[in-house]
Every structure is written in C-alpha cells, then in structure tokens.
Amino acid sequence: MRLPVAAALLSLVACSESTEGTTPKLEGLINPLQRLITPPRVCNAGGGTTGWRLELIGSRFTPVPRDALTDTPSVELPQVSLSGPADYTVPADHVFFARTELMRLDLPTRDTTPSSSLPPGTYRVSVTNPLGGTSELEDALRVVPPPAITNLSTPGGFNYGGGSPLVIEGSGFRSDALPLIVLQRDGEEDQPLFTVTVVSDTRIETEVPPATPEGTYALTLTNPEGCSVTRPQALTVTYPRLGPLSVSPASGPASSDTDIRINTTGSAPFTPGLRDVYLVAPVKTDPGQTVNIPLYDVTFDSPTQLRATVPTCSGFDSRPVTDPACPGGVVPGTYGLIVTDPSGAFGTLPSGFTVSP
C-alpha cells in the first residue's frame, strides 16, 4: 500500500522542474460569488462554519509530500498569508491544492471556527511554497464588513394593487452591485423584492410587490460577495379596506360571460381611476389550481358601484370565444372576488359569485 500512496503524492510535484525552492507566481484571487470583480471582496462575517471560499490563480504552486513511505503520508501545501490593516496566516487545513495553477482557501470570519474578524480594508496576499520561494500581490483582496439595517420606512403606506415604496437605511450597502432582498415569514415562501435602487452606501429604495399577503415579515439583505443581515419582525404589511361588498347578479352560466355590478357601503367607498377585479377560481385547462382571473371592462360608475364582466366562458382566453364548450372557461362552482382600488385599498367577497353548469 505504501508505494501507490507515495506515487500519488509525488505526482503532485511532478510538473515542477525542482522540488527545492520553486518560486510560485500569484496572479490574482477570485471570489466565486463575483468572478468579474477585481480585487475580490470578501466579508469578515458569515461564511457558514468554514468561511468564505476564495480561489488563488497563478503558477508553480508546489506542495511537498511528507512521510510518503510511512503508514501516515501527508502533503505540506503552500502557505497563504495576508497583510494590511492586520496580518493573518490562513490555517493550513483551510488551504486546498487543485493544481499548480490553482489553489482554493476558506477564509475564516468572526462567525467561523476558528474565528478571525479581519479589519475592513485592502490586503496584500502572499503564497510561500514549503521549500522556499514567495510571491506577493499588492491590493489582492478587499475585506468588507456585513451590511447593517438601522431603519425601514414605507412613505406611502401599503398599496394592495401596486408596488409599495420601501426605504431601507443602514450601512455597508453596495452601489456597484445590487443586493438580494427578501421578505420572510414562517409557513410561506420567501418574497424577493425585485425593484431595487441603491441610492448610497447608507440608503436603498425598493418596493413591496402588489398583493403581498398581510402579516409581519423578517427582511434579509445579502450583498453580492455574500455578506448578509437579517432584521427580524422588520415589516408589518397591512392594507386599507373597502367597505362591505355585494355583487349582482351573483351567478352566471359557464357557457357565456356575465356582466355584473359590484356595490359597496360604509365609509370606504370606491375612488375614480384604474383598478383590477379578480374572480378567484380554477379554469378548465387546469381544474386543480385556483388562480386570480381578471374581470373585463371594469368601470367606475360611482363611489358605491362598479361594473365589470366575469369571463365565465373565456377565462384567460381572448374574446370572443367561438367554441360553445368554452374549453378555457371557469370550472362551475362558487368562488370569491377580489377588488383592488386606486387608493391602495382592497376588498374581498368570499363565495361571491357562482358559475353554474
């Protein structure tokens, strides 16, 4: 068993002209999360249990086999060190040899074991082969702190039918690359925020998507290099309500679309402007899935009345539907309505409309 093991270890250095004093050449570092950013950024926090993975690119990285003819052969890898705002040598068990042109390392952070919270700033990186020879690269790595959130505000409140502006204030935001921002609530899938503008390293403007379910959410912001921060119970989404709703007629045949009137009473009337009304129901092409089917020709008549057409026959299909079987129509049954108002309010009418066979 000893000879095959020794041969495998010796093959690591076979491409070198000599195993004595080969000088490596370090050409650059890469953060796999942002391969095109030079110098790479790496966070001094997070990184799971082992730290942030980095790649070292160059040539003549030369490990040396140790105790090759014993029962416990090993390999001594090149040493990787950082110098700048602080000096640090990466632990040997966090350095991994791929080939003479590539090594990988896991850089510890304040949250790993072992931990090392490097001060933010730019670092020189050096690689030293076991038998001597060192290569240094100035400004090879930039260490950054994780972002911090100090305040969230919704200047206009929440709008059920449209995006609700959200302002995030804090520090460590990245204006050169957009962060990933998600709302999180137990029992629901994460809700990404898609419209994001980094105004400065202390301010982000984004918006909560329309019809985000009401409730209290945590907010997690992740910078592209991997740094993240989570603010629990950061945001409570609530919407203003329309007054009580009623519909007339409250039913229609599946064989044709149905014109209806939606009425409201109370102190929260309809307001003029464009709006959406939905029938929450399945269609014949996918009867097992309930979807929001937009009503046609929604018209504001007065603060207490809207007119609309329920697409009981057409469903999502373009009108007119010439097939009398209405193959894309609504499955017969009793379903709810959702009414969104330009004011940002909404109203629901559970079991409000029946599609008869």
Image (cartoon, rainbow, N blue to C red):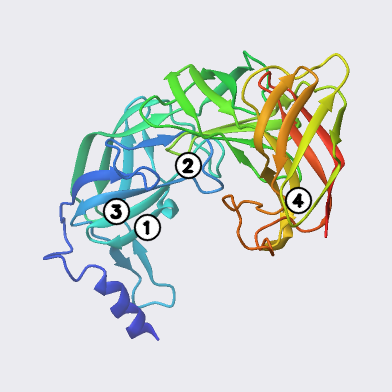
Cα separation, mark 2 vs mark 3, equals: 18 Å
| Label 3, residues with CA under 10 Å away: few <14, some 14-19, many ≥20 | many
Q: The disc labelled 2 sits on which kind of residue? A: Pro
Frontmost of labels 4 and 1 is 4
Snapshot quadrant of residue 149: top right
Quarter the N terminus occupies: bottom left
Element at label 2: loop
Q: Residue at x 65, y 53 (%)?
A: 314
Quarter the C terminus occupies: bottom right
Q: The disc labelled 3 sits on which kind of residue? A: Pro
Element at label 3: loop
- Residue 345 pos. (x, y %): 73, 23
Q: Is residue 148 above or below residue 180?
A: above
Q: Which residue is mark 4?
A: 281
Element at label 4: strand
Q: Is residue 168 left or right of residue 137?
A: right
Residue 78 image label: 3
Q: Residue at x 69, y 45 (%)?
A: 292
- Residue 352 pos. (x, y %): 86, 41
Cα separation, mark 3 vs mark 1, equals: 9 Å
Residue 96 image label: 1
Q: The disc labelled 1 sits on which kind of residue? A: Phe
Q: The disc labelled 4 sits on which kind of residue? A: Ala
Q: Residue at x 28, y 35 (%)?
A: 39
Residue 84 image label: none
Q: Which residue is mark 2?
A: 108
